[in-house]
Amino acid sequence: MSNQTYSPDKVWQWKEGNGGKFANINRPTSGSRFEQPLPQGEHSLQLYSLATPNGIKVTILLEELIEAGISEANYDAYTIDIMEGEQFSSGFTQANPNSKIPALIDLSQNPPLRVFESGSILLYLADKFATFLPKDTMTKTECLNWLFWQMGSAPILGGGFGHFYAYAPEKFEYPIDRYTMEVKRQLDVLNNHLANNKFMCGDTYTIADMAIWPWYGQLVEGRLYDAAEFLGVNEYTNVLRWSRDISARPAVKRGCIVNKTWGEPHEQLHQRHHSSDFELKTQDKLITE
């Protein structure tokens, strides 16, 4: 535990090395850093992403849409290596001026339509295909309540707790305690809600579940920040039940490996172009076992 006290300068100045683990890519400026167009496949939907919690929200939805028989939801997915700064290419910054994954381009629109921010992409696709977004006003509003709850809450989990607990170059008591307290409060919000609801919107599985599960479901199942024991997740029994139900869905399993570049080889699918790509991964696993 460091006891150093930081005294901010009168005017903050960026210094080489700011940002800890992410110092090689973090800058206080936006915009492209090099010229490179984005690759393009044969489908109307082109996804540029990485299998982070924000990234897999979209691949889970796309795989769920395909599972539901919507062939128009087929897509090409290309990996954006954020640790190597690929999100700062000229092509990617045109797709998302905020240089964050995921970014989607819908080539069926004229001119091609860019969609960025994971919540916006979920809402766009659910609306486009009229699936996983309830139609009646009450349930739809509840779905959007929880979708935007996730948008506002997850930065506390990722940029707050996750950063200071898992990634910061030094461990400081105050930020870890502060963000741990808030994450546990968020888990309690979910746990109380799920006590009387199978999914976030009652019995209806929606984009709200697909937005929340990659962060909070993976957290309680020990897949995020290696923090399940520290957070005492076993007390959130309703969140665990909900999360395990979602984890078991075939489309979720597929969505979690798209654009994944770490872990076991059979759990990685750097690019996705056809449903048969997953069958090849299954065959690879059988061969190596």
Image: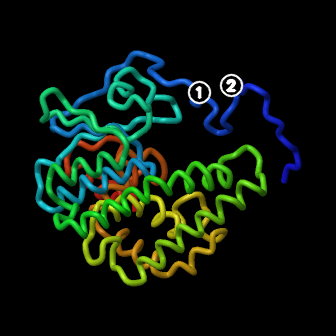
For label 2, the residue is 14
- State the image coordinates of residue 139 (x, y, percent, origin top left): 25, 69
Whether tag 1 and tag 2 are in contact, CB under 8 A, the answer is: yes
Q: Nearer the viewer, residue 67 or 241?
A: 241
- Residue 153 relative to residue 125: left or right: right
In x, y percent, where is residue 249?
Answer: 30, 68
Q: Classify residue 64 by image quadrant.
A: bottom left
At label 1, the amino acid type is Arg
- Image x and y of residue 113, in percent: 21, 33
Judge whether 30 appears above or below 193 on screen: above
Task: Name the mark on residue 142.
Answer: none
Sequence-first disc among 1 and 2? 2
Residue 25's image quarter?
top right
Residue displayed at 85% across by 49% down: 2
Q: Mark 1 points at which residue?
A: 27
Three-letter amino acid code at the position of disc 2: Trp
Describe the colour scheme in one phrase. Answer: rainbow
Residue 81, above or below 75: above
Residue at the far right in the pictured view:
3
**Are there few (<14), some (14-19), or many (20+) residues within 10 Å of tag 2?**
few
Q: In the image shown, does 243 or 155 lie closer to the viewer? A: 155
